[in-house]
Amino acid sequence: MRWPRLRFTVRLLLGLVVVLGCGLGWIAHKARTQRQAVARIKQLGGSVLYDFQEVRGGASSSTEPRGPRWLRRLIGDELFQEVVRVQLNGLDLRGADLTCLGDFPGLKTLNLTCTDIGDDGLAQLGQLKLDRLRVLWLADTGISDAGLARLAALGGLENLDVAYNPVTDAGLKSFRRLGNLEELSLVRTPVEGPGLADLHRLRRLRLVDLRGSKASGAARSELMKAVPGVHVLPSSAGAVSTLEMLRAAERRGRR
């Protein structure tokens, strides 16, 4: 039986070269974009964590990117590492400063505690493609109920902190679409309780922190009945001071 001979015409070879060139160009562009975004984060005073540095229960700087060392020496590390965490807590930021976060498609954790991004900053986040974002810390960022509405675009969130912000019961309806939410901090917010009913359908909730808020005991009890297994820290369980919050933000920045 004769096998058909493969005929490599000039047109076919040119086509393969074009496809290969486009692929390599896209990879190089992706690496260059991430490198520039990391430089911008550091220029703002923040820091990043790469996927190879992330380990269970914390972070490690003793490992190195995947890929052969000889190849990384030749073309650089950027093709073999992906940013998964960004720390910008405590910095003087504006909404426009967050644009570079869109260049981190693998971003999972974002710490914006004690910044002044406000509702404009949340509007900017809502426009970015952050499908893999799981942890978002927004304590003391000047956001309001209007800003919370932008969180609907971040449906993959599992851990959300909006403590020390003037968010009210009315704003909690924005959480209805956060079906993956497991932990929520409402520490020192004006929430009084009725809005907690909007959390009743969040079946994955495991912790809601109401310390220092105005939430009633009745609303807390109703939430615990509606969501089996959720632990709700009552408003009277010892309020968190501003100093404690700042120290917590500092610890997060070291992780």
Image (spheres, helix red, strand yellow):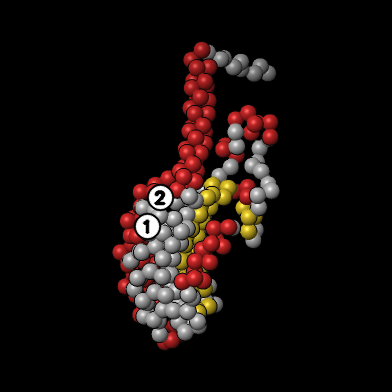
Q: Residues within 10 Å of mark 1 (few under 14, many from 20)?
A: many
In the picture shown, does residue 44 fall above or below 177?
above
**Foreground residue, 133 or 187?**
187
Q: Is residue 20 above or below residue 177?
A: above
Q: Which mark is residue 117?
A: 1
Query: For the residue labelled by badge 2, is the local secondary structure a helix, a strand or a loop?
Result: helix
Mark 2: amino acid:
Leu
**Which of the two labelled residues, at mark 2 and mark 1, occupies the earlier sequence position?**
2
Q: Which mark is residue 98?
A: 2
Which quarter of the rendered picture does the N terminus lie within?
top right
Query: What percent of the width, then of the height, locates residue 243?
Result: 49, 71
**Residue 200 rendering spot, x and y as whole percentages:** 43, 75
Residue 3, given in percent of the width and then of the height, sits at: 64, 18
Please indicate, yes or no, whether residue 71 appears anywhere in the rendered image. yes
Indicate the secondary structure of the residue bearing disc 1: loop
Q: Amino acid at mark 1?
A: Ile
Question: Are the residues at dot 2 and dot 1 in contact (C-beta closer than 8 Å)?
Answer: yes
Which residue: 50% across, 54% down? 87
